[in-house]
Image (cartoon, grey):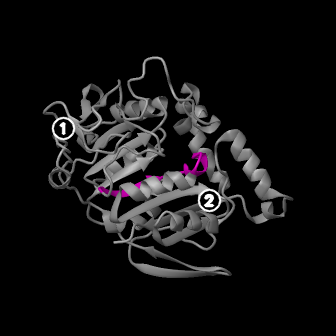
């Protein structure tokens, strides 16, 4: 039996309908849409672009859909081979920035596009929350029981979440999508297999999470490997050219980011006008509002863990608005919330 949602709906049936829900501080509109035919566009290709002439470089980026950029200077990266990047070719690929001359290469399962790539004796130490998800055991368990337990907080389950996500992403179907903080690639693989996007980029800071995603892909028969790329990168310094990403998804992730505002600002930077950001998280409101000094306690917890517990929908809307995104929408079920916002055209 489907979970009963409050102030929301689940698109369990096909067809078109609009439902409006009123809260004391906002009217939230959710649209239920049908997804019949699949959309498949040609695979994205990456070829050399010389950024010496900014105008020429921008035109070449536009023509070739070369969206990868150096995480240091954000100039386009050149692929040092004739191959097309994919989940199969990325581990053996090399890229170079023609501006700062920094070189990047693939690892066993993914492209390594963090600023510290290539450092021999130094590695950035991230927040406690980020380092926690880099542990091999946590990466192994995430999709083998951990993610399923989210149902106790109101998450409807991956299949129903995916239907909700597709409703929000309808305006950008056929384009490229970044699954940010993808974990073991649960939704990255669904995006790729759906055929609704020309390119799916599974992005995470955890090498072990990306390894798990790679192993899951290899276990599936007839998986569209050419439409998926695995990239290790920092959510606060995304390795993409400004204004060339059609959609960004972040499932159950924003509360793990050390600075949600910085991360959403980066997402806003890389999205094209009209691009859509869709994410889910959990909120600590309702009965928890009566906890004394909840907001100061939240700040202390964030300083210790590196994550950010969000208290209500208004905080998320404030973050999106501050980062230049508009048309904020959200749906709730107990602690679970899914929201979307759009980059102005």
286 and 267: which one is in front?
267
179 and 332: which one is in front?
179
Which callout, 1 or 2, points to the residue nearer the camera? 1
Image coordinates of residue 271 in percent, x first then y, are 36, 58
Answer whether residue 206 is magenta in the image: no
Q: Is residue 35 visible?
A: no
Residue 339, above or below 71 = below
In the image, the segment drawn in magenta is 244-259
Residue that appears at 41% across and 42% down: 203
Answer whether residue 255 is magenta in the image: yes
Numbered disc 1: secondary structure: loop
Is 222 placed left or right of 159 in the picture? left
Pointer 1 or 2: first along the chain? 1
Residue designated by label 1 = 84
172 and 205: which one is in front?
205
Residue 244, above or below 257 = below
Image coordinates of residue 25 in percent, x first then y, are 65, 79
What separation in Å lies between label 1 and label 2 (alpha carbons)? 38 Å
Q: Is residue 46 visible?
A: yes
Q: Can you tell which quarter of the image residue 148 is in?
A: top right
Residue that appears at 57% across and 44% down: 147
116 and 111: which one is in front?
116
Is 254 placed left or right of 118 in the picture? right
Residue that appears at 60% across and 40% down: 146
Query: Which residue occupies the extreme right position in the image?
Result: 292
Numbered disc 2: secondary structure: strand
Residue designated by label 2 = 336
Question: In what quadrant of the picture does the C terminus appear?
Answer: bottom left
Image coordinates of residue 186 in percent, x first then y, are 45, 44
Q: How many other residues sit within 10 Å of disc 2, few (<14), some (14-19) or many (≥20)?
A: many
């Amino acid at each position: 039996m489907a979970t009963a949602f409050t102030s929301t709906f689940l698109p369990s049936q096909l067809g078109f309908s609009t439902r409006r829900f009123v809260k004391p501080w906002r009217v939230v509109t959710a649209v239920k849409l049908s997804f019949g035919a699949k959309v498949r566009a040609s695979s994205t290709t990456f070829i050399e672009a010389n950024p010496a002439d900014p105008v020429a470089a921008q035109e070449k980026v536009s023509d070739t859909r070369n969206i990868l950029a150096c995480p240091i200077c954000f100039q386009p990266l050149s692929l040092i081979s004739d191959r097309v990047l994919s989940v199969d070719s990325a581990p053996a690929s090399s890229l170079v920035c023609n501006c700062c001359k920094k070189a990047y290469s693939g690892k066993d399962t993914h492209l390594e596009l963090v600023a510290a790539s290539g450092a021999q004796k130094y590695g950035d130490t991230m927040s406690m929350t980020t380092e926690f998800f880099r542990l091999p055991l946590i990466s192994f368990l995430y999709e083998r029981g951990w993610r399923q337990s989210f149902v106790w907080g109101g998450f409807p389950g991956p299949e129903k979440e995916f239907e909700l996500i597709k409703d929000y992403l309808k305006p950008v179907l056929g384009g490229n999508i970044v699954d940010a903080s993808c974990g073991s690639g649960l939704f990255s693989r669904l995006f790729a297999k759906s055929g609704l996007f020309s390119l799916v980029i599974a992005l995470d800071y955890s090498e072990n999470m990306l390894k798990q995603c790679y192993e899951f892909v290899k276990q599936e028969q007839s998986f569209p490997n050419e439409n998926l790329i695995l990239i290790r990168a920092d959510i606060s310094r995304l390795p993409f050219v400004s204004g060339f990403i059609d959609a960004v998804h972040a499932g159950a992730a924003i509360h793990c980011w050390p600075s949600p505002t910085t991360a959403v600002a980066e997402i806003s930077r890389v999205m094209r006008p009209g691009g859509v950001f869709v994410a889910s998280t959990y909120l600590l409101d309702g009965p928890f509002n009566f906890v004394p000094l909840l907001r100061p306690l939240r700040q202390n917890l964030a300083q210790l863990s590196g994550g950010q517990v969000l208290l209500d929908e208004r905080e998320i809307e404030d973050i999106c608005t501050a980062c230049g995104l508009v048309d904020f929408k959200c749906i709730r079920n107990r602690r679970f919330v899914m929201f979307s916002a759009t980059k102005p055209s």
